[in-house]
Image (cartoon, rainbow, N blue to C red):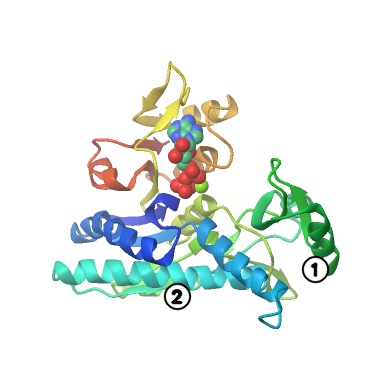
């Protein structure tokens, strides 16, 4: 029995509400397997397509004057946490009922503290929302103060910063829910980024990497294990090359060396390996497994996945 933070990747969720509701039924099964085995499970997840959809819909409606004002990005993040959280609550709840396990599933709308002096704020990199032609992009940039950049020949897009998470604001609530026997969904989409000014918190348009936010959460709630579930069963070196090699384990030292060699794609596998290293280093005995959703159970039994430990 262990305290486990599961970070769900994009492939565990869906691109439309109908698709997602269908998909999360499958996602729920390996999660409930872990719960059934007696583990305390906390779930974090990404929100790229979902927050994109909400943001896009809201800005299109605002542009068309169908609604009075645009929906700010932190609010879009909050909406995505509620939407995804509801689907996970529904699916995990139903799976628990079908196995006669009496447990409640609750989503905590979560703010995650970032530092306004984080260098990321000087260099926004994360594209969000629609593509615009140059003229519209320039007009919106002027009207709303957005940073717009040309995105690989596909048009202009807003970019927001991706600062590092410092703290999970609602962590006591999360811990109490775990103590009360609930399955908790938190730091969705990396959390709603907030900065602190004179003791007060303010939402800020940014995207916190969900792998880093999950790692921070795992440290704060004193988890034993961080399980990062993604589209691949293991981490590879020489990925997609003829000499590709799938790794069953990496020490922190090896992971750092391979990261420095550029073995892991920034923006996809690198943040996972970095999060794994951070967690394994944070306290003796902590480890991280990177694997796919369908292999979660086997990976926990040590049969597959990539384990990162000291
Ligand atoms: P998620 O939504 O789970 O965060 P990402 O697409 O961001 O998913 O990251 C997972 C992807 O990283 C894998 O599907 C794989 O295509 C890619 N990837 C990049 N480098 C590697 C590597 N060295 N080993 C395995 N997968 C890699
Ligand atoms: Mg990712």
Can you tell which of label 2 and label 1 is closer to the viewer? 1
Quadrant hosting residue 158: bottom right
Horizontally, residue 73 falls left or right of residue 33, namely right
- Count residues near mark 1 (Cα–Cα under 10 Å), then give few for <14, some for 14-19, many for 20+: few
The number of callouts visible is: 2
Quadrant hosting residue 87: bottom left
Question: Residue at 84% of width from left, 63% of height from top?
Answer: 139
Outermost residue on the bottom side: it is: 68
Q: Earlier in the sequence, mark 2 or mark 1?
A: 1
Outermost residue on the left side: it is: 100
- Front residue of 127/117: it is 127
- Determine whether the residue tagged by mark 1 lies in a helix, strand or loop: helix
Q: CA distance from mark 2 to mark 1?
A: 35 Å
Does residue 281 appear in the picture of this structure?
no
- Count residues near mark 2 (Cα–Cα under 10 Å), then give few for <14, some for 14-19, many for 20+: few
Q: Do labels 2 and 1 touch, CB within 8 Å? A: no
Q: In what quadrant of the picture does the N terminus appear? A: bottom left
Give how far across and how far down residue 161 sits, in percent.
70, 54
Label 1 sits on residue:
144
Horizontally, residue 110 falls left or right of residue 37, namely right
Horizontally, residue 59 falls left or right of residue 108, namely right
- Front residue of 133/226: it is 133
Label 2 sits on residue:
173
- Determine whether the residue tagged by mark 2 lies in a helix, strand or loop: helix
Quadrant hosting residue 30: bottom left
């Amino acid at each position: 029995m262990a305290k486990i933070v599961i970070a769900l990747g994009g492939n565990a969720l869906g691109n439309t509400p109908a698709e997602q509701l269908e998909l999360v039924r499958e996602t729920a099964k390996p999660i409930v397997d872990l719960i059934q085995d007696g583990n305390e499970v906390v779930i974090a997840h990404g929100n790229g397509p979902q927050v994109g959809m909400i943001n896009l819909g809201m800005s299109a409606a605002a542009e068309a004057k169908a609604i009075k004002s645009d929906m700010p990005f932190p609010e879009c993040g909050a909406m995505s946490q509620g939407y995804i959280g509801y689907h996970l609550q529904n699916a995990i709840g139903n799976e628990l009922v079908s196995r006669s396990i009496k447990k409640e599933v609750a989503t905590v709308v979560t703010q995650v503290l970032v530092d306004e002096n984080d260098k990321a704020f000087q260099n926004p990199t994360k594209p969000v929302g629609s593509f615009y032609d140059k003229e519209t992009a320039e007009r919106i940039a002027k009207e709303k103060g957005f940073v717009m950049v040309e995105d690989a020949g596909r048009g202009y897009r807003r970019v927001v910063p991706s600062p590092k998470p410092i703290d999970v604001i609602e962590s006591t609530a999360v811990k109490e829910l775990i103590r009360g026997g609930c399955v908790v969904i938190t730091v969705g989409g990396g959390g709603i980024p907030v900065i602190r000014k004179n003791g007060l918190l303010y939402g800020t348009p940014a995207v916190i990497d969900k792998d880093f936010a999950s790692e921070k959460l795992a440290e704060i709630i004193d988890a034993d294990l961080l399980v990062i579930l993604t589209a691949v069963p293991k981490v590879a070196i020489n990925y997609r090359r003829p000499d590709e090699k799938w790794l069953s384990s990496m020490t922190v030292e090896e992971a750092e060396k391979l990261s420095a060699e550029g073995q892991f794609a920034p923006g996809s596998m690198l943040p996972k390996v970095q999060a794994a290293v951070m967690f394994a280093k944070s306290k003796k005995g902590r480890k991280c497994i990177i694997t796919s959703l369908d292999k979660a159970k086997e990976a926990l039994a040590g049969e597959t996945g990539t384990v990162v430990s000291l």
